Image (tube, rainbow, N blue to C red):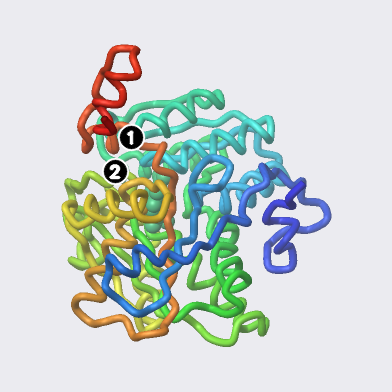
């Protein structure tokens, strides 16, 4: 059996021999060279995809959730709660099920991709659709956790960030060093915070020789970190990052700044273009929010130019099946054909 993250990176994580390990075998996700995307970008850098959709619940959230649930159980929690644009709730529900805990999930009504909702329900979480956005839901779960015996497992829970930093460790282990550049989507801003911490800790431990520049990407209609103020009604087709007031605001801005990188914005049109190209060119299907990392890199290359030979990693944060409706809505419906060889051959233009 592949060991989970707590086993692999125990020395870097806030666990002890007394911590019960709640794991679903997360981490160890592929890092793939993306030559066909390099051609699409028109760059001479080496571009790699970190395929986080390969985690057990289909997103990077599992890295944080294995630590958050393990610590919650160690601390005696019987129930966990989170607000979510979908992936956090899917992951929390899965790890809570594995831990034998109850899970309570608050999502923005009508704004969560169906695959994610189906996961939370299948794992037995109690799901509430809040008549508001993610930011409203986050405020509510903070209030609930402050007044009731329920452990909060959003990324304001420090154990989430601790677990998620292992994404940076793996990138370094897979490349043999930190990349020159890491491109990553930004929503509630926990993951960019976690990656920066991970790269710093790995270099301090002499497991990497350098630090990457971090490029974080928000959607234009939900870009508080770019605008410098919260966005009251965030809008984007990338529902996972439809967030107007990120919890890890300061640490994300600090991470991008200290690394010599930046947080920028990409339009929904740019996101959808990358979302279409990645699966066609590379055989990797990610959700729209994840495609923002590639859309952003394209924009960066156009505006500033990626140095030839530099190594760039795009973090594809979630699996495309999470939001299957989106892919189907962008493609023509499959043609219906009679059950004959002639009809099939004709429809495939083989005859
Ligand atoms: N990509 C995906 C697929 C996500 O689900 C999220 C966040 C992000 C990127 C952004 O990461 O919040 O650490 O900056 N999803 C959260 C959720 C908000 O509730 O599932 P972040």
Task: Indicate the position of residue 291 as horizontal and vertical percent values.
Answer: 32, 55
- Closer to us: 212 or 142: 212
Of 119 and 274, nearer the camera is 274
Whichever of labels 2 and 1 marks the residue nearer the N terminus, that label is 1
Residue 334 appears at what percent x and percent y? 26, 26
Q: Residue at x 33, y 35 (%)?
A: 112
- Can you tell which mark lies on residue 78? none
Front-lying residue, 133 or 170:
170
Instruction: Classify 59 as above or below 258.
Output: above
Q: Secondary structure at mark 2?
A: helix
Q: Which residue is mark 2?
A: 239
Question: In x, y percent, where is residue 249?
Answer: 35, 64
Local SS, label 1: loop
Horizontal relation, residue 76 to residue 276: left or right: right
The residue shown at (36%, 44%) is 139
Give the number of the disc on residue 112: 1
State left or right for residue 299 relative to residue 241. Answer: left
Q: Which quarter of the rendered picture does the C terminus lie within?
A: top left
Q: Is residue 10 left or right of residue 108?
A: right
Image quarter for residue 180? bottom left
Percent position (x, y) of residue 38?
A: 34, 69
Query: Camera-side residue: 13 or 283?
Result: 283
Answer above or below: position of 128 versus 159: above
The residue depicted at 50 percent of the width and 62 percent of the height is 32
Is there CB contact under 8 Å for labels 2 and 1?
yes
Residue 11 drawn above or below residue 120: below
């Amino acid at each position: 059996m592949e060991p989970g993250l707590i086993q692999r990176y125990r020395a870097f994580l806030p666990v002890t021999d007394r911590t019960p390990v709640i794991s679903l075998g997360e981490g160890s996700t592929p890092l793939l060279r993306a030559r066909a995307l390099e051609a699409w970008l028109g760059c001479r850098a080496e571009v790699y995809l970190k395929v986080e959709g390969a985690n057990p619940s289909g997103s990077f959230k599992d890295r944080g959730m294995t630590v958050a649930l393990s610590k919650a159980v160690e601390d005696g929690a019987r129930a966990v709660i989170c607000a979510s644009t979908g992936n956090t709730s899917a992951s929390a529900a899965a790890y809570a099920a594995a831990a034998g805990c109850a899970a309570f999930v608050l999502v923005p009504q009508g704004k969560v991709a169906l695959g994610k909702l189906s996961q939370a329900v299948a794992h037995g979480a109690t799901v509430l659709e809040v008549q508001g956005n993610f930011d409203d839901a986050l405020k509510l779960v903070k209030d609930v956790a402050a007044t009731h015996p329920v452990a909060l497992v959003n990324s304001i829970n420090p154990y989430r960030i601790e677990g998620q930093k292992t994404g940076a460790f793996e990138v370094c282990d897979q490349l043999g060093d930190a990349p020159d550049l890491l491109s990553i989507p930004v929503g509630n801003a926990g993951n960019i915070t976690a990656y920066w911490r991970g790269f710093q800790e790995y270099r301090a431990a002499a497991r990497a020789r350098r630090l990457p520049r971090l490029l974080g990407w928000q959607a234009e209609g939900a870009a508080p970190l770019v605008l410098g103020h919260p966005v009251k009604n965030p809008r984007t087709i990338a529902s996972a990052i439809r967030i107007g007031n990120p919890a890890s605001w300061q640490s994300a801005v600090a991470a991008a700044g200290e690394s010599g990188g930046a947080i920028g914005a990409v339009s929904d049109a740019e996101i959808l273009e990358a979302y279409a190209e990645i699966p066609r060119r590379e055989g990797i299907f990610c959700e729209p929010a994840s495609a923002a990392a590639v859309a952003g890199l394209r924009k960066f290359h156009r505006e500033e130019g990626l140095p030839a030979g530099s190594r760039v990693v795009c973090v594809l944060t979630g699996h495309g099946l999470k939001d299957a409706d989106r892919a189907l809505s962008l493609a023509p419906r499959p043609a219906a054909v009679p059950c004959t060889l002639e009809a099939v051959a004709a429809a495939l233009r083989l005859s």
